[in-house]
Amino acid sequence: MSIIVNPDLCTGCGQCVQICPGGLLSLTFSSERSGSRTENLSNAQLTQTVGPAEIKGQVRINNPDCCWACAACLKECRFGALSLFLPPALGGRGASLTASASKDSVVWQVLFPDGRQRTIAVNRQIADRY
Ligand code: SF4
Ligand code: SF4
């Protein structure tokens, strides 16, 4: 079980890297000018080095087998760039989960292999009581 990164949506903001309790995520930045790839530098460091317009950040998961599908990174990503493979017991083979979180709610969306979708909205204030 592991997350999936949509490279077209990931901005390299690093929020998911901060929140992963297992420290499984890291950022890779590439400079279009030099074509070089450098990992684990902060945005500020790279801005000083090559200039902001040339930087393309991207998150990646290291040791995907260690991901226990807590979904914290999904809720943290404001760009919808992450989804999670669901085990057969939860969604069937090939199903995936995305999340869209705001201050008051989390909207979960399950996408099944046959194209069906299921949306589950959770009120955070009520959920936090339990
Ligand atoms: S996956 Fe989302 S939260 Fe993580 S670096 Fe990319 S845009 Fe930011
Ligand atoms: S689902 Fe949880 S353990 Fe897996 S990468 Fe995201 S934050 Fe880390």
Image (cartoon, rainbow, N blue to C red):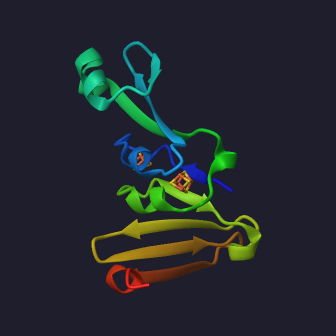
Q: Nearer the viewer, residue 46 or 114?
A: 46
Instruction: Tell me where residue 37 appears, x and y as whole percent.
Output: 47, 20
Classify the position of the C terminus by image quarter: bottom left
Which residue is at a point 63% across and 78% down the rendered structure image? 116
Which residue is at a point 42% across and 63% down the rendered structure image? 75
Which residue is at a point 35% across and 79% down the rendered structure image? 124
Q: Is residue 78 above or below residue 47?
A: below
Q: In the image as oriented, which residue stretches furthest toward the top?
A: 34
Instruction: Tell me where residue 89 appears, x and y as whole percent.
Output: 74, 74
Image check: 64 left or right of 57? right
Q: Nearer the viewer, residue 26 or 116?
A: 26
Tell me which corner region of the image, top left, top right, bottom left or bottom right, holds residue 61: top right
Instruction: Tell me where residue 11 appears, x and y as whole percent.
Output: 37, 43
Tell me which corner region of the image, top left, top right, bottom left or bottom right, holds residue 107: bottom left
Image check: 46 left or right of 113? left
Q: Is residue 50 above or below residue 80?
A: above
Q: In the image as oriented, which residue stretches furthest toward the front?
A: 130
Q: How many marks?
A: 0
Which residue is at a point 47% across and 50% down the rendered structure image? 20
